[in-house]
Image (cartoon, helix red, strand yellow):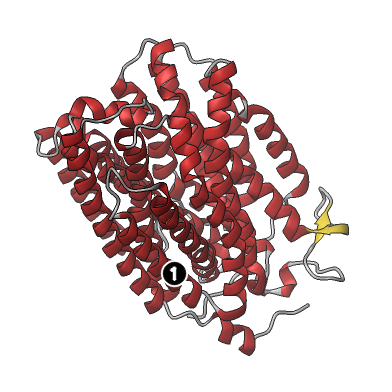
Amino acid sequence: MSPRGVGDHPATQATPPGGGTALPGRGGAPRPGIAYKWVALSVTTLGAAMAAIDSSIVVLGLPTIMTDLHSDLVTMIWVLMSYILMSTIFLMLFGRLADMFGRVRMYNLGFGVFTAGSLLCALAGSGLQLVLFRMVQGVGGAMLMANGMAIITEAFPRGERGRAMGINSITWAVGSIVGPVAGGLILAVSSWRWIFLVNVPVGILGTAWGYVALHEIGRPRRGERFDLRGMLLFSGGISCLLIALSQGISWGWLSPAILGLGAAFLLLESLFVLAERADGPHFIEPALFRSRIFAFGTAAATLQSLSMFAVNFLLVFYLQGVKGVSPIHAALMILPLSLVQSVVGPVGGALSDRIGARGPATAGLLLQASACVLLAQLTASSPYLMLLAGLLVLGLGGGLFWSPNTSAVMGAAPPESLGVASATLATFRQTGMVTSFALALAVAAAAIPGRLVGEIFLGSSVELGTPVMSAFTVGMSHALAVSALIVVAASAMTFIAADTARSRRVAAPEAG
């Protein structure tokens, strides 16, 4: 099967002089102005920026929120996990519904739901209410994540998608920079509630801009039936996995509850696989994984998330627990990672447009593996320059990998399944991230006293005693070595996913 994207078919878009698609009116007729592809990118980038800043800004405010709402550590962990849980289990649902009823409509609805959830979070009167309202945010986030990449893939021709993905990826790096800094400033001068209120004007702007500027390109598949059984099995299994991973430290990894949740995950997902092999409607498109690019590219993205998300948390633990720096100083010391990634991301995307995704993506992963090896040498007395070198290489590798990989995977999906393809990729990435998150906490819990794990994770400035610092750095070194091995495995996936994008462009050049 030759993977295609909607952007490869000139008949689906009106192309004005200069390339791209003219900004349409509400009736769908093109009018002169900014090319539609850039308009679509601006809307999806605004949504990604809002979600990225929110994900990083909340962590810094958890200690203050816990005190103000008279809550506890477990509830605060669920303030984080409830968003991840809902955004993960609903990705496939909203991706499928978008293919059936229109992904622009679903994306705009996601902006509205996320904004409403943010307002509700700011008004929460208890820890439990905040958890419930974060679930509302997670539902809106799933709508945005499931369709953002699909909208970009539709709007941009194949030879420009890598650059578009690279520009969009900047927002996640910038979000990890702006989030902690903005959170520190907000907490210094005002209430934690403004952490959520800042999303409201951005969300209103995004909702209005998306409604005015975006229009459907692909044809919704309205005649299809929805696989409710598959959705329940898949979502139930993922929920069991995420709950087990988030509660493993507090309940004990070998406790009956955790083992039961693990068994339930395996059972439900096994039943899901059997159900998907039967005739009838499918929750996940089996045809997507017949493409080597899609299958191995998604595997590489999952492994990269599994390894790299843990690295970020381990370095936060290291800086606050071993080096004894404050949360805001720790955030500033890690900023070079995001800065380099934000600069290199568009370069990696543009490079993949010219030579294909295999080279940049594979090189990026190998650079990240070497960075993990370097960071594994850190000790309590290591200078900051050693950490800085590792962060710079890590950011360089991430920038080279993310955009080319995403562009290749989305380009391998047929036009009518872009929503499911985007949701599938995001679901696997999210699962890798939360599994990596549990790995980081497990390593920290094994190396330092349990009473300190939550304090370090929540952002309190805690300086460990010498014996504990030594134990933690050894555990961190082992975890980083494992991360390096996982990234090497991911690089093998990107190399196996034979990237024929360049030869396809030669054989079937873009019109216009």
Q: In this orientation, which residue lies closer to the viewer: 141 or 446?
A: 446
Three-letter code, disc 1: Phe
Residue 405, placed above or below residue 145: below
User: Observer-nearest residue: 500 or 402?
Assistant: 402
Residue 327 image position (x, y, % from top left) = 43, 31
**Residue ID for mark 1:** 294
Seen in the image, is 144 located left or right of residue 64?
Answer: right
The percent coordinates of residue 511 (x first, y second) are 74, 79
Q: Give the farthest residue toward the right.
A: 32
Could you tell me which quadrant the C terminus lies in?
A: bottom right
Pinpoint residue 272: horizontal percent, then vertical percent: 28, 54
* Residue found at x 58% / y 38%: 178
Q: Measuring 44% from the left and 20% from the top, which residue is drawn there? A: 130
Where on the picture, by quarter, is residue 110?
A: top right
Q: Quadrant of residue 296?
A: bottom left
Q: Residue at x 44, y 72 (%)?
A: 363
Task: Tell me what residue is drawn at x 64 percent, y 57 percent.
Answer: 167
Residue 293 x %, y %: 44, 74
In this image, 414 relative to 363: left or right?
Answer: right
